Amino acid sequence: MTHEFPPPSSDKAQLEESGVLSPRFDDKGLVTTVVTDARDGMLLMVAHMNAEALALTLETGIAHFWSRSRASLWKKGEASGNVLMVREMRVDCDQDALWLKVEVDGAGATCHTGRRSCFYRIVEVADGQPTLRKAGN
Amino acid sequence: MTHEFPPPSSDKAQLEESGVLSPRFDDKGLVTTVVTDARDGMLLMVAHMNAEALALTLETGIAHFWSRSRASLWKKGEASGNVLMVREMRVDCDQDALWLKVEVDGAGATCHTGRRSCFYRIVEVADGQPTLRKAGN
């Protein structure tokens, strides 16, 4: 598959209602990607894709990202075995965000801390100050 | 509530395991925010918060964002009535993403197109080319 996508239309209706995937990559060439569990909808992680990662994901059905910290293409789970198999991909209205519904292979831990989800802390406000509490799930 | 948050710790364990909310705002002062429906977990939208929007959200329980297109603070639903009432907020491991579980007021349309969710198109591959198909939900 080509690693090039058509440029986003300047026509808002075209961008929002057409059948053309034309991601609005940001000034770093990235698009925000939300990953949820296809089974129960749990939010697992948020990451970023460049055009190559998106093309590889579409081609293979396995989630690829761009690692901003390592500045390299990142086949999620390549080392850990927790590969993300994409069951459905969606794009949002203005095409600057993607949504992957996945099944997690391996131990089922998407977060690098070994947890199922990266979102394991709840933000609460106590005495006017935000604090974090670890969630049960 | 103060609109200032402590700077992110350079100690990874502190950032990932502590009870201190220290968002890693990007070079534009923004943190990615994922919004899901508290009732059924449907992904509704992805937006961005600056420190002021985050503080106002924590203070009022109503989702506020930073509108990148309008370059202004954005109380979501202020005009449409589709205000987002935050039932739970979470932060991810490295504190560069937030998750809001919300109840949507008004007509229940989070997307500016009038739809419930911004993610109304499924990305499919046909003959090696990605295309978009409108989803039933």
Image: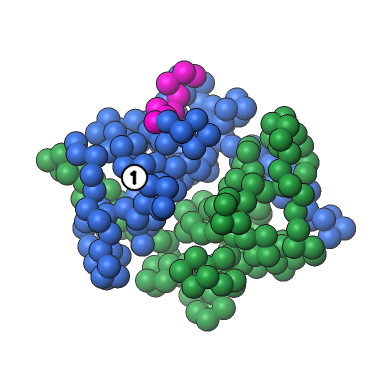
Chain colours: A green, B blue
Query: Is B70 left, or right, of A52 in this rendering?
Result: left
Q: Is residue B120 above or below residue A33?
A: above
Q: Can you identify the residue that label 1 sits on?
A: B89
| Picture residue at 39% right of the left edge, 31% below the top | B73
Q: Which residues are magenta?
A: B73-80
Q: Is residue B78 in the magenta section? A: yes
| Picture residue at 41% right of the left edge, 53% below the top | B26
Instruction: Tell me, yes or no, if residue A45 can be seen here.
Output: yes
Q: Position of residue A78 (x, y in %)?
A: 57, 78
Q: Position of residue A102 (x, y in %)?
A: 59, 60
| Picture residue at 36% right of the left edge, 62% below the top | B94
Q: Nearer the viewer, residue B125 or A42?
A: B125
Q: Where is residue B95, by image quadrant?
A: bottom left
Q: Nearer the viewer, residue B120 or B57?
A: B57
Tell me which chain the residue with mark 1 is part of: B
Of the 4 image quadrants, the one containing the N terminus of chain A is: bottom right
